[in-house]
Amino acid sequence: MSGCGIRALRYALESHADWVWANDGNPDVGEVLQHNLAQLALPSHTGTLSSTRYQITHQEANRLLLGCYYRQDFYDLVDLDCFGSPAPYLSASLGAVAIGGLLYLTSTDGRTATGHAPQNCLSDYGAYVRVHPAGHEQGLRLLIGHVQQLAATNGFGVEPIFSFFKGQIYRGMVRLVARSCLTPQNYGYLGYCHHCGNYRAIAWRELGRAVCPHDAQPMVVTGPIWLGQLHDVEYLQACIALAEAWNWKSQARLMRLMQTETDLPPYFYLLGEIGRRGQIDIPKRASLTQILQDWGYRVSSTHIHPDAIKTDANLQTCVRAAKSISA
Ligand SMILES: [Zn+2]
């Protein structure tokens, strides 16, 4: 869905892409798309003529992407910006990316990602995800996990560069590499205890023993999903340096937050949930973070939810810390 072509234009003008192919399945947008990309008719930064810098088509996405694979016409970046679930296009998208190139994923199917349409999830991702407070992080992990597994079927892998959730949009930028990255540790299950609010990652071999470490209650199990890192810290560092050089303050702040959340457990606790379970007011994030850190736990905010923390402390420890603030 190139739409009016704004992103295609930005790839060319701001990111200095050598060449951009803008495809939108709807031919009705063709005139607008053509009008906007006509700006690329100026000489490009490399001095080549812009008439060679872009192409517009209105093909069905899979036909286009599989055509690239068939002709061995591989791209440094494929931006799959679709509406709803990207599942029907993921396999073909991987086939159009060069080794070492990037695939930029999109999903706007929040119902499926957050466990409200488990039957859809099974059809789209071969996974069964459930409802719990960290549902939006699950949406990112569902998407990356599925692409990782699809890549592995051909002996390839993907490395997450960054993952981003905002509003109702899930985006994941991954790099295609010529080796499988799928392991039983980074692709598995997440358990949630409705009884006490704790989470834990559950390995494939532990599926028969999916009980809560706090109260031994059976956990609701979601997955398989990606349990590895959502971002590449070094890549983010390079982006932060650029953002700072350009004085893009909010982007730099966002990416620094992504860095701190990277290697924390694959879920978060809502501050409201901590307050509710402790029967106290909703704790202030900064105070709660300070106390947990003083107690030796690792804590970060998360870009996925403004009123949540990621930590290796369990929920009961968070409640105790929150109570000690009011005390
Ligand atoms: Zn429990």
Image (tube, helix red, strand yellow):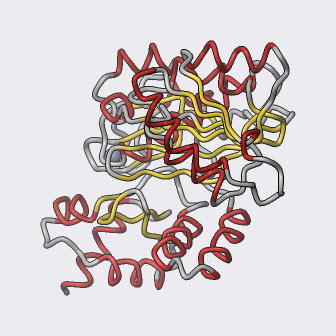
**Nearer to me, 168 or 299:** 168
Quadrant location of residue 105? top right
**Nearer to me, 200 or 300:** 300
Look at 30% across and 50% down and name the residue there.
197
Look at 28% across and 28% down and name the residue there.
116
Quadrant location of residue 271? bottom left
Rendered view: 309 above or below 67:
below
Q: Position of residue 209 (x, y in %)?
A: 50, 30
Q: In this view, does 299 lie to the left or right of 273?
A: right
Quadrant position of the C terminus in the picture: bottom left
Q: In this view, does 215 lie to the left or right of 293?
A: left
Quadrant location of residue 8? top right
Rendered view: 154 above or below 279:
above
Look at 37% across and 50% down and name the residue there.
198
Q: Position of residue 168 (x, y in %)?
A: 33, 44
Rendered view: 120 above or below 107:
above
Q: How many marks?
A: 0
Look at 60% across and 41% down and name the residue there.
104
**Nearer to me, 308 or 59:** 59
Q: Position of residue 46 (x, y in %)?
A: 83, 57
Q: Where is residue 301 in the image (x, y as percent from the top left)?
A: 43, 69
Q: Is residue 226 left or right of residue 233?
A: left
